[in-house]
Image (cartoon, rainbow, N blue to C red):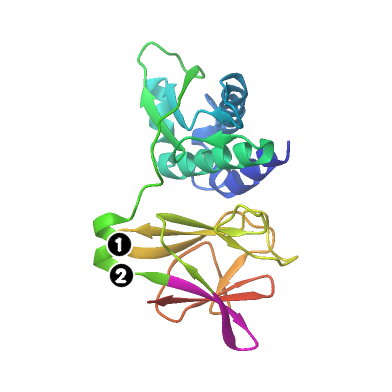
Amino acid sequence: MPILRDFERRLEGLVEGLFAKAFRSGVQPVELAKRLLREMDANQTIGVHDVWVPNHYRFQLSAEDHAKFEQAEQRLAAELTQLVRDGAAERGWKLVGPPEVVFETDEELGRGEFRCIPSLVEGPERPLTGEMGAVGKALLYLIHNGQPSATYPLDKPVVSIGRLSDCDVVVSDAGASRRHAEIRLQDGHYVLADLGSTNGTKVNEATVGERQLEQGDRITIGRTVLEFGRA
């Protein structure tokens, strides 16, 4: 399944790097991903025109497994959340609100055991509210022949960049991955993160994994150049 392969590829650096030892036994991230997709498929709600699937997934883990995931929990939750978006988009399913994945401990579970509890939590995409007002609006400018040719507002907590048509910033570039990178509003700053792309992401010609953006920074994806700026 392509979206599962993308999920595994994005997590390769995480699993093989700092947290490799933690993931050697017990629950594996790909097991969580497979169960999430099964729960999406099993819990469809058929509407008049659309098929709706759960957007909120609560994973219950053993105390031992949850402790292993602690340092990687935020990244893992973000990747599983993206998997919800990808899974729904691939099948033409609808979500009633923004996807969310959370982890909690269940003392009754043993190592390697887990539960996934799906639910539909209705609501709009979360606005940036006070944090947005504090840091000011930001934009990405598509640079063509040295000049801005298109503008993309960074008006969501997470803005996705890639070749997929449902990305917030669609990059029609052979050097771009389907889900190439994202920009997050984090602690009052805009942070660019590569999502395990095939060809990498550059900021001011330097390859980065994650980087806080500053006024005028130029992001290169394949041959596409995007400039970060504040409105």
Does residue 20 appear in the picture of this structure?
A: no
Question: Is 183 above or below relative to 117?
Answer: below
Indicate the amino acid at tag 1.
Met
In the rendered image, which quarter contains the C terminus?
A: bottom left
The residue nearer to you, when weighing 75 against 150, is 150
Residue 132's disc number: 1
Does residue 86 appear in the picture of this structure?
A: yes
Quadrant of res 212: bottom left
In the orientation shown, which residue stands out farthest toward the right?
174
Residue in the image at 45% along x and 82% along y: 216
Mark 2: give few (<14), some (14-19) or many (20+) Cα within 10 Å.
few
Residue in the image at 24% along x and 58% along y: 130
Q: What residue is disc 2 on? A: 136
* 147 falls in the magenta region: yes
Instruction: Find numbered disc 2 in the image and state the secondary structure of the residue it sits on.
Output: loop
Chain part drawn in magenta: 139-150
Check if mark 1's residue and mark 2's residue have beta carbons within 8 Å. Answer: yes
User: Where is residue 90 shown, x and y percent of the image?
Assistant: 67, 40
Indicate the amino acid at tag 2.
Gly
User: Whole-Å distance between the Cαs marked 1 and 2?
Assistant: 6 Å
In the orientation shown, which residue stands out farthest toward the top?
108
Question: Is 195 above or below relative to 100?
Answer: below
The residue nearer to you, when weighing 91 against 162, is 91
